[in-house]
Image (spheres, rainbow, N blue to C red):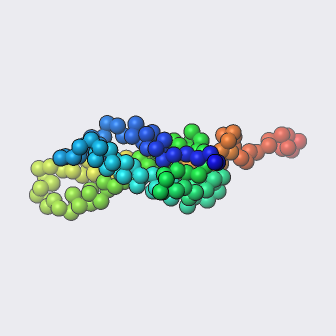
Amino acid sequence: MAESTSFEKLFQRFYRRIENDDEFFNYYNIDTEETMQLAHDRARGCLLDALDKLASADGLQVDFSDYDEEIEIIHFKTTAKENKLIVDLMFQFYMERDLPLLHAFKVNFAPSDLTVFSPSSERNSYEAFIARLNTENEIALDNYKNRDRDTGRLKNTINYSIYSGI
């Protein structure tokens, strides 16, 4: 069998990334097994979103759409840098899921309510945080595209020695 990467390997890394997020792991009136199943389902959704984003990117050396949802594997061995990129994208997608709540929060408060409690700075901070995550992930993806996945070396470099005679 060809080498592959299990979804579980990526889930474990993602869980470590968000281990202090009480909302991800805490559910009321359900047992530990059901809690872990819900966490698994949510992590799976984030992973599929991350893989789909990578699959739609141009210029990658591997096809990130080459995965099997049923048996939860990617049909190639991912590198450490790919694992980090995937988990970073999973985290971004997880955090973006709260953005619609911010909009609802903004709509439900009247201006008089906002003089007592102003969620504006918190909302702006969260939106800036999401924008920063997106920018960092775009830079990381661009960096990944421009490097050989096995060696980590830049694919295209300028040979300055050919210009020394000018």
In the visual, does 33 lie left or right of 141? left
Q: Position of residue 130 (x, y in %)?
A: 38, 50
Q: Does residue 55 appear in this view?
A: no
* Of 106 and 93, the residue lying toward us: 93
Given the current orientation, which residue lies at the most extreme front position?
1
Rendering coords of residue 141 (x, y %):
56, 49
Is 2 positioned to the left or the right of 126 in the image?
Answer: right
Image position of 95 with respect to 110: above or below: above
Q: Total label count?
A: 0
For the point 74% across and 45% down, the residue is 157
- Mark yes or no: residue 164 visible: yes
- Residue in front for this viewpoint, 152 or 35: 35
Horizontal relation, residue 34 to residue 82: left or right: left
Residue under the point 34% across and 37% down: 19
Q: Nearer the viewer, residue 112 or 40?
A: 40
Q: Residue furthest bottom?
A: 107
**Residue at image location 84% in from the left, 44% down from the top:** 163
Give how far across and how far down residue 91 sits, in percent.
41, 47
**Location of the C terminus (image quadrant):** top right
The residue at the point 39 percent across, 40 percent down is: 15
User: Residue 118 placed where, x, y %?
Assistant: 18, 50
